[in-house]
Structures are given as C-alpha cells and as structure tokens.
Image (cartoon, rainbow, N blue to C red):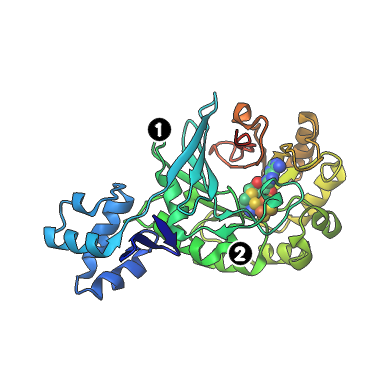
Amino acid sequence: MDSVHGIRYTTPLMTKENLKGMPLRELEPKLMALGHPAFRARQLFRWVYQRGQNEFENMTDLSKVFRKELSEKFCLASLSVDRAEHSADGTIKYLVMLEDGQKVETVFIPAEDRNTVCISTQVGCKMGCKFCATGYQKFTRNLESWEIVEQCFLPFPRPVTNVVMMGMGEPLDNYDELIKALEILQDPLGVKIGKRHITVSTVGLSPKIEDLAKKGLANIAISLHGTTQEQRSAIMPVSRKHPLEELIVLCQRLKFKGRRRITFEYVLIKGVNDSNEDALRLAALVKNIRCKINLLAYNENPFCSYERPSEKRVLSFQSILLEKNLTATYRKSRGADISAACGQLRTASLNRVSQNAARSLAFSPEP
Ligand code: SAH
Ligand code: SF4
C-alpha cells in the first residue's frame, strides 16, 4: 500500500481518503458535503479517538448504510511498530514504521501519577543543533497530523495521560500539521488529553511561538541552552535567525491564562554553558518572565564530542537559580539502560512533583 499526503491507494483503481488527522472543523464539513448531519462527524470522531476503532464496520451505532459508504470512500490509517525496547524502569521506546518506510521514535514514560508519551513531529530535523543526534540526521519530511496523533495509539501498557512533543523534529517547523494534531489531542470528543497535559517543545521559532500561545492549545517549552547570543548560536544555529534577545523579549510579552507559565529547557553541557556565571546570567535573563526552568544534563551521543557535566555541577547550577527564587527543577535520566550505544537522543519531561526529567532514549543501530 502506498500513501501520499494522506491519500491511500489500496488498489491501482481505487483511492481512499484517510479521515484520520482531520480535526472536527474539517471532518464535519466533509461529511456534510456528502449529505450527513454534523453530529455524524462527532460520532465518528469519538469512535476513532476515544475507542481507537479503525474499522468503520465495527462502529455499531452508525447505520449499516453509512458504514458501507464510509468504507467505500474512506479509510482510517494506522502506524505499525517496527521495534520496541523496554527499560528496567518501565520506559518503552518504540521505533515506529511510517507507510513510506521512514521511521520515527515514540517513547512511553510511565510514572506514578502519569503516563507520558513523547512523540515525534518530523523525520529528521532542519535545525541542526550541534548537541542533538536528530540534528545530525538529514531532514526527510514532515509528519502529517494523523501520524503525529497516531503515536498516542501505539500498544502501550497503560492509558496515556500526558503528551510531550519532544521526539524527533522541530514541531513549530511543521506548524499546520502540529495545530491539527493538537486540536484532535485536546478535543473533549477526540483524544481528550487536557491542554495543560500537552507540551510542545521548540527550539525558539519566535513568530510561531506567539501564535501557538494565542491559540492556547498546549504548554510551551523553549529550548534555551545558552545565556549569551554568541554561546547559544554556537550550539544552536537557529539563534542566528531568531536571536536570544528576540526570544526573551517575546517571552516577556506573552500572556498566559490562569497559572500557566512558560517552561525553559536548559541542557547543561560540560564547559560550554554550565558555569556559575551562566546560572547567574540565566537568572537575569528570565527574571521578568513567568516561567519555570527544567535543567537537563547533556546526554552524550556518538555524533558529537560534548561531555555531560557532573551531577555536582548541575546541582550547583540549580542552587544558584533557586537562590534567585526561580523554579528550577532537575531530575535524573530514566531509561538509561536502553539508551546505551544509542544513535539518537530524546528528552521528555514528566513527574508532576519535580516537573522535570531528562533522558536519552534511542535505538541501538540496526543490526
Ligand atoms: N525540536 C524541539 C523538540 C525536540 S528536542 C526542541 O529542540 O525543543 C527535545 C529536547 O531535547 C530539546 O530541549 C533538546 O534541546 C533536547 N536535546 C537534544 N539533544 C539532547 C542531548 N544530547 N542531551 C540532552 N537533551 C537533548
Ligand atoms: Fe531539531 Fe530539537 Fe534536535 Fe535542535 S534539539 S536539532 S530543534 S530536534
């Protein structure tokens, strides 16, 4: 079976459109154009995203005639798992096979009070951050909205409560598909993950951050990783286009509803950005921003020669931020046993109490 932009070709003569990945605002008019009332779209939506049903014929409260019409005209695409690796701490990494043979990683992270899934938004990434394994892979393509959402429907051992867009790729570089996916994820008739339980992590594409904040569909985490323009652009080339100052000014301006605040992720890399001076500069940078800071220790990977700082260094860095009355969390990596000999790295935040986690999660090279 082949697939191009959501259209699936089941036989050479028959093309079927995939209905997955359409938020209700698209699904309703689609079915209405075929003469069906809007509530049919809502029924279908619930079957697909709340019950995970992929066969129209099993949607028993839809009329037989309607089910037949749906299966003649449409399909419901799904992803397959190529490989799964289980960590002793319960973390599971899935290597997910896309219809065109590309692969992305999805990580399931169980914790006492939540089950988080860390999902990818692109195959590869264009941003080329110097410390990131994905940044060393060539960008292949954007994921479609259904491929983003569908990563929440892998055969996990427990129901998903939280979603973080911290897998492969830069979510805001695939903006339209990201928005559709977020709409489906948080829709009470859809996957029904509360907006406050969804986090989008971005390298800092300022104009899109502003738009995403206005839409209020998810929490926003910004990968900062540097305290001066020079330092940041040396490890994150995107900083040349969207300078640190622009990012900070934007964050000062952003308005969030209720108690929401922005998250800054800060990966400490030994001798690069982990000094006490950096901690003081970081505190000064964010002092007027309602934020929390997630500190992560750099996970070493075979693509670059950076080193992970000592635990002591990270804790001293954290204590400086705490002394400045900032919320700064640090949590040791999990899934370490399955990240050994890794080719790629993934990070995910979890745990409501510490609100922070860093991990290096990757598949060992294909045999
Ligand atoms: N592109 C987005 C989201 C995916 S990366 C972003 O950059 O924010 C998710 C997080 O993993 C980012 O904070 C990123 O900086 C971090 N990360 C990448 N490589 C890492 C590594 N080797 N060690 C620790 N964190 C890393
Ligand atoms: Fe892309 Fe994020 Fe990796 Fe940078 S850190 S290369 S933006 S995935």
Side of 140 where 328 appears, left or right: right
Side of 126 where 258 appears, left or right: left
Dot placed on the residue nearer the N-terminal end, 1 or 2:
1
Q: Residues within 10 Å of mark 1 (few under 14, many from 20)?
A: few
**For the residue labelled by badge 1, is the local secondary structure a helix, a strand or a loop?**
loop
Give the residue at x 40% y 58%. 184
Task: Locate residue 237, reporting x and y percent.
Answer: 77, 59
Pointer 1 and pointer 2: residues touching (CB < 8 Å)? no
Task: Locate residue 334, reporting x and y percent.
Answer: 60, 31
Looking at the image, residue 174 lies above or below residue 164? below
Task: Locate residue 185, reporting x and y percent.
Answer: 42, 54
Give 74 or 272, whichever is nearer the viewer: 74
Side of 230 where 345 appears, left or right: left
Side of 258 where 50 appears, left or right: left
Q: Residues within 10 Å of mark 2 (few under 14, many from 20)?
A: many
**For the residue labelled by badge 2, is the local secondary structure a helix, a strand or a loop?**
helix
**Which disc is residue 10 wearing?**
none
Task: Locate residue 357, reporting x and y percent.
Answer: 61, 38
CA distance for labels 1 and 2: 33 Å
Residue behind label 2 places its C-beta within 8 angstroms of ligand 1? no
- Most distant residue in the front direction: 12
Give the residue at x 67% y 51%. 137
Tag count: 2
- Residue on which disc 1 sits: 157
Q: Can residue 121 be seen in the rendering of this structure? A: yes
Give 231 or 344, whichever is nearer the viewer: 344
**Which disc is residue 209 wearing?**
2
Looking at the image, residue 4 lies above or below residue 150? below
